[in-house]
Amino acid sequence: MTDVAHRLYTLAERLGGLLHAQRLVLATAESCTAGGIGFAVTQTPGSSAWYDRGYITYSNESKQQMLGVPGKYLAAYGAVSEPVARAMALGALAHGHAQIAVAVTGIAGPDGGSADKPVGTVCFAWAMQRDPAGAPWAKTAALHFDGDRAAVRTQTIVAALEGLIDLLVERQDV
């Protein structure tokens, strides 16, 4: 097992333990990682107890159709934006059986960047709804990663998993 694979497995295993202990189920909404987060978490035996589903929404149309991302968000902010990431995470909660979700949308490269959003820009959202009668809680972040396409995607997966772990350990939603 490579160092990267070992790190992802360790993070996924820790995440699974926290989700299991808190009786929460995870959903993922991914664009630039194209299912990499879902792949990482399902490497852990027993993940079916705490992982509901993953949405790979690479195109703007799929973000709207599968997750309910408003077209006006895509037009106003672009696909790589915190408002779109937030809408993706909330959509993953609304369209499945999970209580916690992570969403990522970014520019992995080598092309597609701009002065405002260079290659390596990734927007994240973590959302949780512990009480079905209450409104979901969400946190967003925009990060920049260096390296080639594979490096950006791997760093995105690591950051997504670390964000979930931090959320569950620190109980930021309550």
Image: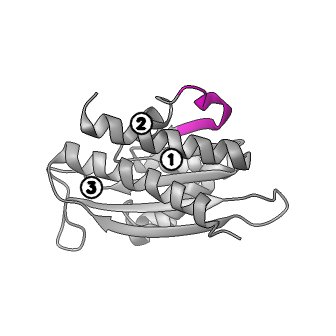
Magenta span has 50?
yes
Q: Residue at x 61, y 37 (%)?
A: 51
The residue stretch that appears in magenta: 45-54
Dot 2 or dot 1, earlier in sequence: 2
Q: Quadrant of the N terminus?
A: top left
Q: Which residue is mark 1?
A: 29
Q: Which residue is mark 3?
A: 107
Q: Residue at x 34, y 36 (%)?
A: 6
| C-alpha span from label 2 to label 1 | 19 Å
Residue 109 in the figure: left or right of residue 31: left
For the point 37% across and 65% down, the residue is 78
**Where in the figure is residue 111, as x and y percent of width and height?**
15, 52
Q: Closer to the camera: disc 3 or disc 2?
A: 2
Q: Is residue 166 visible?
A: yes
Q: How has the structure been colored for display? A: one colour
Task: Answer with left or right where residue 83 lies relative to residue 25.
Answer: left
